[in-house]
Amino acid sequence: MADTLLLTLSRGPALLIPAEELRWRFSRAGGPGGQAVNTTDSRVELVFDLLGSRAIPEALKARAAARLGARLVEGVLVVVAQEHRGQWRNRQAALGRLRTLLEDALRPPPPPRRPTRPGRGAVERRLEAKRRRGVIKGGRRRDHLD
């Protein structure tokens, strides 16, 4: 089966992961399906060797490996799908999950935050609100009631 994976990145060209770099494993899934669940291999595992891939540049591999660190086992990413009754739909679900994971991991980091300070009007409004609240609370004090 020729399942290539097209990754669209926010900056730069799209990446195409060839089918040869994707390995599939199938097994019997639990869940709905009645008697058919005992006879069909509808559970899908999609295995992608991120660090061994030739389709992804080294700089992007390092970024993805850092972000996917907990999900990688020796540089390999495994995605499982078993929520559908048919193998085909589980294959599509696994491809979609892998695409989402890789696109998020390969996305460039956001620009650094520029520290800002509140404006004069915001500071004055905040202090005035504190003064009003203090007057309200001060009116509840016992020495004020006597």
Image (spheres, helix red, strand yellow):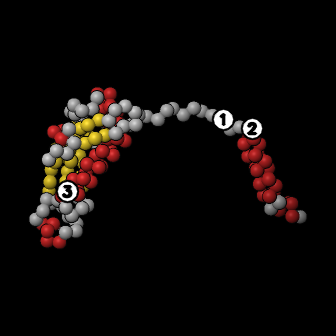
View extreme (left): residue: 39
Disc 3 to disc 1, how far (Cα)? Answer: 54 Å
Q: Name the residue carrying label 3.
A: 88
Q: Is residue 125 above or below residue 11?
A: below
The answer to whether the residues at label 3 and label 1 have Cβ atoms under 8 Å apart is no
Identity of the residue drawn at 66% across and 35% down:
117
Total number of numbered discs in the rendering: 3
Residue count near mark 1 (Cα–Cα under 10 Å), binned few <14, some 14–19, many ≥20: few
- Observer-side mark, 3 or 1, equals 3
Q: Secondary structure at mark 3?
A: helix
Which image quarter holds the C terminus? bottom right
Say whether residue 67 is visible: no
User: Residue 48, located in which quarter of the rendered image?
Assistant: top left
Q: Position of residue 18 (x, y in %)?
A: 20, 38
Residue that badge 2 annotates: 120
Residue furthest bottom in the image: 34
Whether residue 61 sits left or right of residue 109 in the image: it is left
**Residue 25 placement, left or right of 78:** left
Q: Is residue 138 left or right of residue 94?
A: right
Within 10 Å of the Cα at label 3, are there few (<14), some (14-19), or many (20+) other Cα atoms?
A: few
Disc with the residue nearer the chain's start (3 vs 1) = 3
Q: CA distance from mark 3 to mark 2?
A: 61 Å
- Mark 2 lies on a secondary structure that is helix
Amino acid carrying label 2: it is Arg
What residue did someone put label 1 on?
A: 117
SS for dot 1 = loop
**Farthest top residue?**
58
Q: Work out whether 112 lies above or below 146.
A: above
Q: Point out residue 104 in the picture as x, y percentages from the top left corner.
A: 37, 41
